Image (spheres, rainbow, N blue to C red):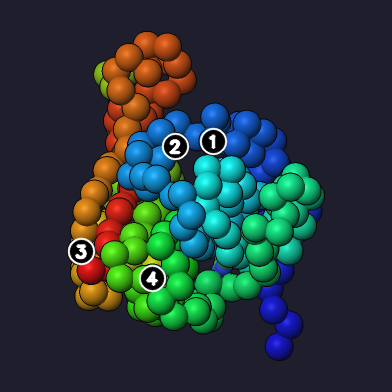
């Protein structure tokens, strides 16, 4: 049976994705990055795995910040090719880019000090996510940490994820179907399939895999951020990102 083309390999989607601020500017275009960077901590001489690495912004940052090597993987060969092209020659020997699908990825045992993933796991159904958590746990050295971001479940849940205006002018986030985990189709960049799961499922999945939770942030803009960037007002109504740090003891 022919396999569906990965979303990020579709030329129309890929071209639209490249125009987003966080793909144009990297971490400088990602408002949650300073919080994530603090959660990750120092990575000097560490072995790092970057899952769903996209254009490789984090992988390059990691080796520039002292990581020994980074294994970086993504299902999209277009993203991986672009990530390789964007990697300066001096860093190339320390980043191993690989095209692979997280739905069936098998990882090396007790290898990594840090497993990182940004905004990717909401593309996996629950069965794949649960399986992957066990793989990640096994792939970490004792004391290793796993830090990731996903779209917040309050953001992935609604059938129509955009602010709505009430008759009295107040804006509301149309949260519905929160308990119904599973596939959502939204019209972001022309049409995307994602998977919604609750905060409970994320946290219980991590604990069931053996992890100890170390940090947990529902990322929202600060009041002063919105004063500087009024277009961020939605980031005060509801959290868009869930950031998590866990450890393998
Ligand atoms: C929103 S992008 C994030 C990219 C990068 N982590 C970043 O923060 O810039 C999501 C990435 O997940 C990848 N992805 C989606 N489903 C995947 C899967 N099943 N296996 C591996 N990568 C996947 C996509 O190809 C895409 O590069």
Residue 237 left/right relative to 22? left
Looking at the rendered structure, the number of numbered marks drawn on it comes to 4
> Which is nearer the N-term, disc 1 or disc 2?
1
- Ligand 1 under 8 Å from disc 3 Cβ: no
Q: Position of residue 5 (x, y in %)?
A: 71, 69
36 to 224, vertically: above or below? below
- Can the viewer see residue 184? no
Q: CA distance from mark 1 to mark 4?
A: 25 Å
Q: Which mark is residue 27?
A: 1
Q: Which residue lies at the image location 53% right of the left edge and 72% below the top edge?
A: 102
Q: Position of residue 212 (x, y in %)?
A: 20, 64
Q: CA distance from mark 2 to mark 4?
A: 23 Å
Tag 1 secondary structure: helix
> Which is nearer the N-term, disc 1 or disc 4?
1
> Which is nearer the N-term, disc 2 or disc 4?
2
- Can the viewer see residue 208? yes
For mark 3, what is the residue?
212
Q: CA distance from mark 1 to mark 2?
A: 6 Å
**Quadrant in the picture for residue 28:** top right
- Quarter the N terminus occupies: bottom right
For mark 2, what is the residue?
33
Q: Which residue lies at the image location 59% right of the left edge and 43% below the top edge?
A: 64
Q: Which mark is residue 140?
A: 4
Looking at this rendering, what residue extends furthest in the top direction? 227
Q: Which mark is residue 80?
A: none
Tag 3 secondary structure: strand
């Amino acid at each position: 049976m022919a396999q569906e083309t990965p979303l990020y390999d579709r030329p129309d989607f890929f071209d639209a994705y490249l125009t987003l601020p966080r793909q144009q500017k990297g971490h400088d275009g990602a408002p949650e990055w300073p919080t994530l960077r603090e959660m990750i901590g120092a990575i000097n001489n560490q072995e790092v795995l970057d899952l769903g690495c996209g254009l490789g912004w984090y992988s390059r940052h990691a080796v520039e910040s002292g990581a020994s090597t980074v294994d970086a993987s993504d299902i999209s060969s277009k993203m991986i090719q672009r990530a390789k092209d964007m990697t300066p020659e001096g860093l190339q020997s320390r980043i191993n880019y690989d095209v692979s699908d997280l739905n069936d990825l098998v990882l090396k045992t007790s290898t990594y000090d840090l497993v990182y993933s940004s905004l990717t796991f909401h593309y996996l159904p629950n069965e794949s996510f649960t399986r992957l958590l066990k793989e990640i746990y096994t792939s970490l050295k004792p004391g290793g940490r796993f830090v990731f971001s996903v779209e917040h479940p309050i953001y992935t849940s609604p059938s129509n994820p955009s602010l709505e205006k009430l008759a009295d002018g107040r804006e509301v986030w149309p949260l519905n179907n929160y308990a119904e985990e599973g596939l959502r189709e939204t019209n972001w960049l022309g049409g995307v399939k994602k998977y919604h799961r609750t905060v409970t499922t994320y946290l219980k999945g991590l604990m069931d895999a053996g992890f100890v939770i170390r940090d947990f942030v529902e990322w929202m803009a600060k009041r002063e951020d919105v004063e500087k960037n009024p277009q961020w007002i939605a980031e005060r109504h509801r959290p868009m990102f869930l950031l998590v740090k866990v450890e393998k003891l």
